[in-house]
Image (cartoon, rainbow, N blue to C red):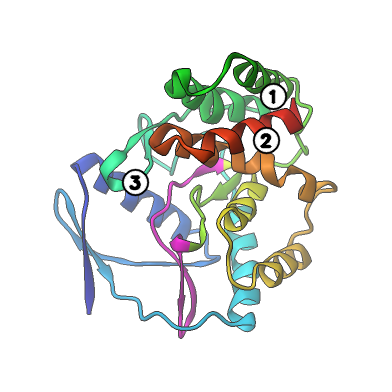
Amino acid sequence: MTHTKTEPSERASDWEVAGLDWLRVAGGAAVVRVLARDARTLQLEALTPTAPSAAAAEAFGRGLAATHAAGAPAFGVGPDGWRGDGLQGPVDGLIPLPLAAFEKWGEMYASLRLEPLVERAGCRFASDQRADLDRVCSRLRAGDFDTGERPARIHGDLWSGNLMWTPDGCVLIDPMAHAGHRESDLATLALFGCPHLERIRAAYDETAPLADGWRDRVPLMQLHLVLLHVVLFGGGYVTEAASIARRFR
């Protein structure tokens, strides 16, 4: 059986396929398979949902560590062979995901993930909130939060809705795949809650130990997607983003 997914454009379809292929060849966490496609329609393997389990969570944690370890040439680049920017956001509200090569994660995160969204958010932020966000970006560029790790091959939008629990284990769907910090995928799982999250984290950490202070950096790693929600929805996400900025300014 297959699941049909219609994309808003051919480029959006290309972006999703490129991300799924790039994650799959890493040989780590399971990734939904594309069985056929045309310009804007993907035929994906149909996944049978099941109740989350601790065993599946631990297997996924180990698999995700292997996916991240496959790495990438530089922070901020997209899947192998991809040209131009990627896409981020829901199907009915896609905006560009800037892609470029950076040697350091903090500089990339400030330049490609945070600042473009702060600019798009415009007047949603008060002047003091904007100043805090600017200071966070300055600290990122200075390397204050870098952990010295090499670029990881990340899903990029790994909230719990993009992790399917099936009888055969957890399967990744709907990626925003690029080279980033491995802590960001784990932080995104915590953004809206995820079943057996501590089991996932523990199995990951046993497979590929996380750098000291990773728990303190969770909100910083979430800031990209919180800002994306500010741009798309406003509301309480403005307050959440401002609170994170105050913490790391």
Q: Identify the secondary structure beneath mark 2.
A: helix
Asked whether residue 195 is drawn in magenta, I would say no
x and y, in percent, of residue 240 in the image: 60, 38
Image height of 107 relative to 211, above or below = above
Q: Amino acid at mark 1?
A: Val
Q: Which residue position is annotated with label 1?
A: 136
> In the displayed image of the protein, which residue is found farthest to the right?
212
Asked whether residue 169 is drawn in magenta, I would say yes
Q: Kindly check if marks 1 and 3 are in contact, taking CB atoms under 8 A apart as contact.
A: no
What residue is drawn where x is 52% and y is 27%? 112
Q: Amino acid at mark 3?
A: Pro
What residue is drawn where x is 63% and y is 83%? 55
Can residue 92 be seen? yes
> In the displayed image of the protein, which residue is found farthest to the left?
38
Q: Which residue position is annotated with label 2?
A: 244
Can residue 104 be seen? no
How far is disc 2 from disc 3 in space, using C-alphas?
A: 23 Å
